[in-house]
Image (tube, grey):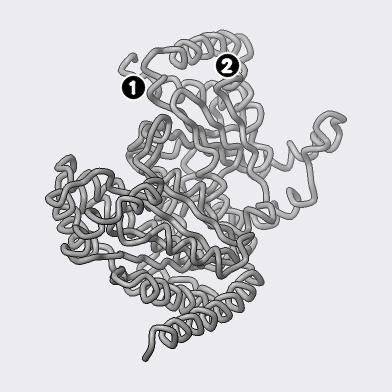
Amino acid sequence: MSDKDHHRKRKAEREALREELLEAQFELRTLQHGSVLLLISGNDFAGKAEIIHSFYEWLDNRYLNTRAFALPKGVERRMPRLWRYWRTLPPTGELGFYLGSWYHQPLMRLSRGQLSIPRFTAQMQQILRFERLLNDEGIILVKIWLHLTDDQQGKRQRIDPALLEQTVAMREWGDFSAADYEKVREGARLMTELTSTQGAPWIRVPATDPHERDQRIGQIVLEAMRQRLASEPSPRPVYGWQAAQRDYLGQLDYSLALDKDDYQEQLHTWQARLRELIQHPRFARRSLLLVFEGSDAAGKGGTIRRITQCLDPRILRVHGTSAPTDEERRMPYLWRFWRRIPAPGNVVVFDRSYYGRVLVERVEGFCDAPDWQRAYGEINDFEQQLSDSGTLVIKFWLAITEEEQLKRFKAREQSPVKRYKLTDEDWRNRKRWPDYVQAMNDMVEHSSTRHAPWHLIPAENKRYARIQALRIVCETLADALKER
């Protein structure tokens, strides 16, 4: 075959692939749930940037989402490792590209001797849980490792310095020597063994011929898009899940109370203590996440106000969690909560929270049983990552009896300043009281952990509940700062 015929054949192959990719991309945009995410790693001289440029030539750029991650800097170094990846996940119906993905930092540190194999293995296990969650949320992962032979790598480094300049923004490994690259390859082999799964295997693609490389990866992405279009993600069953047998709410003493004078004295004391702890120099390296759940009309808002009124508004955010927006429905469930976690030196309060999946969504049937049963493990992993990065997670359930709730509902109906708090949904939820009690007991049973235990507070007396919450926050924070 002549060079001209060979060129014509390759051009035809490229155009045919482009047509198929465009059609699949158009269909992908019609999805209500899930996307395709391509992780590109491997040799810095294998054409990672060129591959992405090819997709931008082939496809509608409005629905492509590219992110390049270097080693973390600034605030990223003090946030959970997966935080920056959660924030940038592609929305439903889009095709995402990650250069320097969540594998880059641990592989780089392993190659430099900064990370032991046991710790590297533990981080790979965390990544596997993350990828399993993404898969359950309908995101198809494509993991590509580009490789060159030693001769090809050396040849490119010697005779094509312009390539280095063109791809400097996309390079993962920096100025690694040949010996350094050998360490990367050794680490990559271990990484592949640990993280190649049936749902997201690592695919090695030779990068000797740019046309063959791009065609191969284009076909892989096309198959992934077709796979995503072929079927909706099916909920993964949770084997061995059991309902709680213990009635946590029934064991509370609802008679506990404070009189007004005692309340005012303790309120002043604990608020002053909290202000002092938040201003402590060590808190600049920590952060605080307060999670408030409880029965309707249990007094969450009043308790939150007593905590926040003594804090600097510049370091404070209070998020009221309601039904997800259209944008949030297009993303994995925990995405909107990952975006709101506190930075070092800051305080975030959730007035209702990510536990909605195992409470209201479960009881009202907004998600399937495998989804809410699986959510306990996902939430525990989320909170573990926060704790590991220095965030104190303190969780409260404010509890009242069914009779007290009815009394407060009727009082709200008569109050011109509280009437807005009472909705038809509140009355509807009362009819499901036993279901919510079981959901709450299950939640405590499956998500009260050493690093993020549940604090159950009887709140028939609002003054008592407020002081208890303040005291727990202060004592937990003092223990963490070693200033108790």
Q: Name the residue carrying label 1.
A: 479
Q: Which quarter of the figure has residue 71?
A: top left
How many other residues sit within 10 Å of disc 1, few (<14), some (14-19) or many (≥20)? few
The residue lying toward the viewer, choosing from 203 and 156, is 156
Mark positioned earlier in the residue sequence (1 or 2): 2
| Quadrant the N terminus occupies | bottom left
Instruction: Determine whether 336 is above or below 407 in the image.
Output: below
Residue beneath the point at 33% across and 72% down: 209
Residue shown at the point (36%, 72%) measured from the top left: 213
Residue that sits furthest to the bottom in the current view: 1
Q: Is residue 93 above or below residue 389?
A: below
The furthest residue to the left: 179
> How far is the residue under mark 1 from the one under mark 2?
21 Å
Instruction: Name the amino acid type tagged 1.
Output: Asp
- The residue beneath circle 2 is 312
Q: Position of residue 387 (x, y in %)?
A: 36, 37
Q: Nearer the viewer, residue 270 or 236?
A: 236
